[in-house]
Amino acid sequence: MDQIKTAMVGTPCQIMAATKINKYSDITGGSPIDIKIGLFCMENFSYTYLEKFLKQNNIEMYEIKEFRIDKGKFLVNLIDGNQFSIPISETNIFTRKNCHICTDYTSDLSDISVGSVGSKDGYSTVIVRTKKGQKIINELKEKDLIICEDLSDKGINLLKTIANNKITKNQKNIQSRERVARQVLSQRHVTEETLHTQSCNCQFSNLEADVISVGGCVLCGACEYVCKSNIIQINDRKPQAYGECDDDCHACYYACPRTYVSTEILPEDIDSKPFGEYIEIMEVKSNSINGQDGGVVSGILMYLLEKNIVDEVFLVGQDENVPWKPKSFVSNKVWDVIAAAGTKYSTVPIGFKALSNKSK
Ligand SMILES: Cc1cc2nc3c(=O)[nH]c(=O)nc-3n(C[C@H](O)[C@H](O)[C@H](O)COP(=O)(O)OP(=O)(O)OC[C@H]3O[C@@H](n4cnc5c(N)ncnc54)[C@H](O)[C@@H]3O)c2cc1C
Ligand code: SF4
Ligand code: SF4
Ligand code: SF4
């Protein structure tokens, strides 16, 4: 049987994990991810801090229907129809610590990156990065499934400013963190050779010391997915190992987006390129679906399934029992793509959970 092909949608850190898993497939076992659609991302939120903050404002997690971000505000929509909101500038207290050391805003390693910043209402800003990504966008355009327009200079400048602000602010955070704690490994710009020398003896205990215990874990779930001994578990909180590692296994350390990243993956001058390497940038709207912004992500995923370009896509929907809780799953059904449209801000691990659950 031919190998299954999967399209992934994810935040920049999740896209980095997918890139590392496939680059070091002889060590990690690889993944079926064939097409990477990256989202722009400024930050995500910590369950513990958010729960505490909401409690102080007399809101319990079970009362929440969903979190949203709109026009500079963080919105908490409650099941009873009420809404609580604060300016996004005040969300710092419950942003995940790992997001404070992240310098990728536009998902530099994806085939196609999608976000809202820079475009007019109802459109998504799209950055096409690879030939594979360009072919998909061109086909959708030819079949009138999307409308593509030039991104305005104002839009490009706004995107550049926001991406550069993230880089500058978080580089400062990295420097201050490194003065009191361990080095932020993903920012070392090491060669492939150094990466292997530093990683080839590392196991879960090293991942714990170098990433998890120093507030670097992005909860992507890649470690859990690649662990063939099935000893890693991530249940709403940080990864934990329940058992002994195989002597020859180093898979989790290689897969983790917050251990070493070589200059073969990200060039040394990447932080001077706010949009990373790309072929074209534009504003795009799907003709077939309403989504968070232009519905472009869902439009692409529907096309990939309908044309059998991939066998399955991994999506983020809502947990049936806990409405605010995002849940990732793998599907080959177009109606699942339609139902999963819209951004879910997540305080729990989602990324590779879907693939892990499938393979176990
Ligand atoms: C945590 C987070 C932070 C973001 N921050 C920014 C930002 O700062 N600036 C900006 O311009 N854009 C940001 N975005 C992206 C933006 O919210 C939209 O997702 C993007 O513009 C795509 O819109 P669309 O209409 O094309 O997507 P849609 O067609 O609505 O499809 C959205 C797709 O994203 C998937 N998805 C939903 N939630 C998640 C999640 N948490 N993780 C992975 N996949 C998910 C769904 O499965 C769906 O397939 C962020 C997204 C996330 C998840
Ligand atoms: S680490 Fe945080 S800011 Fe960076 S991509 Fe992941 S969720 Fe977004
Ligand atoms: S066996 Fe140990 S080193 Fe290998 S992936 Fe699992 S936790 Fe990591
Ligand atoms: S420790 Fe595991 S869950 Fe955390 S960032 Fe690394 S791979 Fe992802």
Image (cartoon, rainbow, N blue to C red):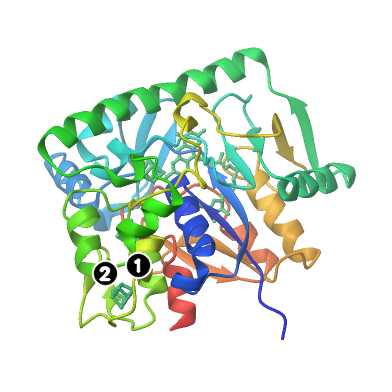
- The quadrant of the picture occupied by the C terminus is bottom left
Q: Is mark 1 within 8 Å of ligand 3?
A: yes
- The quadrant of the picture occupied by the N terminus is bottom right
Q: Residue 66 appears at what percent x and percent y? A: 38, 49
Q: Secondary structure at mark 1?
A: helix
Q: Nearer the viewer, residue 186 or 161?
A: 186
- Residue at (82, 43) in percent of width and height: 138
Q: Amino acid at mark 1?
A: Cys
Q: Residue at label 1?
A: 252
| Residue found at the far bottom of this picture | 1
- Residue at (18, 29) in percent of width and height: 176
| Residue found at the far right of this picture | 142
From this view, report whether residue 161 is shown above or below residue 61.
above
Q: Amino acid at mark 2?
A: Gln
- Which of marks 2 and 1 precedes in the sequence? 2
From this view, report whether residue 167 is shown above or below residue 32.
above
- Residue at (35, 23) in percent of width and height: 168
- Residue at (68, 57) in percent of width and height: 301
Q: Is mark 2 within 8 Å of ligand 3?
A: yes
Marks 1 and 2 close (CB-CB < 8 Å): yes
Q: Nearer the viewer, residue 64 or 181?
A: 181
Q: Secondary structure at mark 2?
A: loop
From this view, report whether residue 226 is shown above or below residue 274.
below
Q: Residue at label 2?
A: 203
Q: Is residue 76 visible?
A: no
Q: Residue 99 appears at what percent x and percent y? A: 31, 40
